[in-house]
Amino acid sequence: MKQRIQPRTLFTCLTFLCLLAIWLSLALGPVSLPLVDTLRAGLRLLGLPVAANGLEQAEMILGQIRLPRTLLGLAVGGVLALSGVAMQGLFRNPLADPGLVGVAAGAAMGAAVAIVGGSWLGGIPDVLAPYLLSLCAFIGGLGVTALVYRLGRRDGQTNVATMLLAGVAMTALGGAAVGLFSYLADDATLRTLTFWNLGSLNGASYDRLWPLLLVAGGVALWLPRRAKALNALLLGESEARHLGVDVERLKRELVLCTALGVGAAVAAAGLIGFIGLVVPHLVRLLAGPDHRVVLPASLLAGGVLMLFADLAARLLLAPAELPIGIVTAFIGAPFFLFLLIRGRS
């Protein structure tokens, strides 16, 4: 029998890694700060009485640039990982991804409409551009997910296989729509659309952060309450019903949480793949399938992985910055191939 890590040990390690990732994310970048000064400036930002000698620049960099970016990375990584757990529980498949219900494709279509459509209308005012883009991406993700869910419903029941096929079809349609908008866009608009599709935490601000924090906080509070129901669903839908689980309601909640979480994350940071696939599966390999452990552990691990990926994106080609979607793909694709090879053997 495979040896599992005890939950207490797992959470201790993840908490340490999370604190380390936050510290490094605040300290490192185009202008690197001494780790001690970063800690002192962070304590001052929290309102603690720390001497301000020589900390003015560090406080400004942390408060205005690094702190919102770090919080955005934690929220995006955590909510994508939680959404991955929800989808893997819904489809009872550890290789399921949050994008299976079409939310990422819908968000990409919404963003393409905002970016390319705005250029056709003579450009969007700078003060409205971040909000309009995020709003269109969020609405697009929710709209496509609602359509996929509706296509999967029949006679008051939700067929997950039909919903999966509908999600695959809508993802292909979304990709075609984004490709069409890319073909019709001019060079400057095409560059903007391409970089958004690759994902980035660059340009993080408190205005972009708070809607995501509200959604991520709601998902992070709600999904763990359904951990026992998800454990029952692992046995099969009939068995879960015999154990008293309202399976149809659970499916609706899982799809809604995924649509809200992924839609908000994509709207805030663009398309970032593999977090929702890699993190939950890695946690299951370490601690087993119990969702009472998998959900909170995935929340922490998703934030940790996102912050380390963002650090790599900032530092590998400094002073230039890689899109974070490229970094997560380089991490996630080999891991996915490892899972396939491991499954064959």
Image (tube, rainbow, N blue to C red):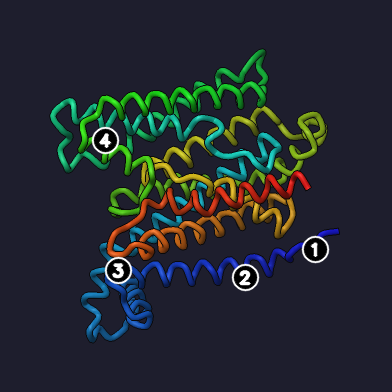
157 displayed left or right of 186: right
- Disc 1 vs disc 2: which is toward the camera? 1
Q: x, y percentage for residue 133?
A: 29, 37
Labelled disc at residue 166: none
Q: Earlier in the sequence, mark 4 or mark 3?
A: 3
- Disc 3 vs disc 1: which is toward the camera? 1
Q: Residue at x 72, y 45 (%)?
A: 228
SS at mark 1 in the image: loop
Q: Can you tell which quarter of the image residue 41 is in?
A: bottom left
Q: Which residue is mark 3?
A: 62
Label 4–label 3 contact, CB within 8 A: no
Tell me the CA gap for discs 4 and 2. 45 Å
Tell me the CA gap for discs 1 and 2. 18 Å
Tell me the CA gap for discs 3 and 2. 26 Å
Q: Which residue is mark 4?
A: 190
Labelled disc at residue 3: 1
Label 3–label 2 contact, CB within 8 A: no
Q: Which residue is mark 2?
A: 12
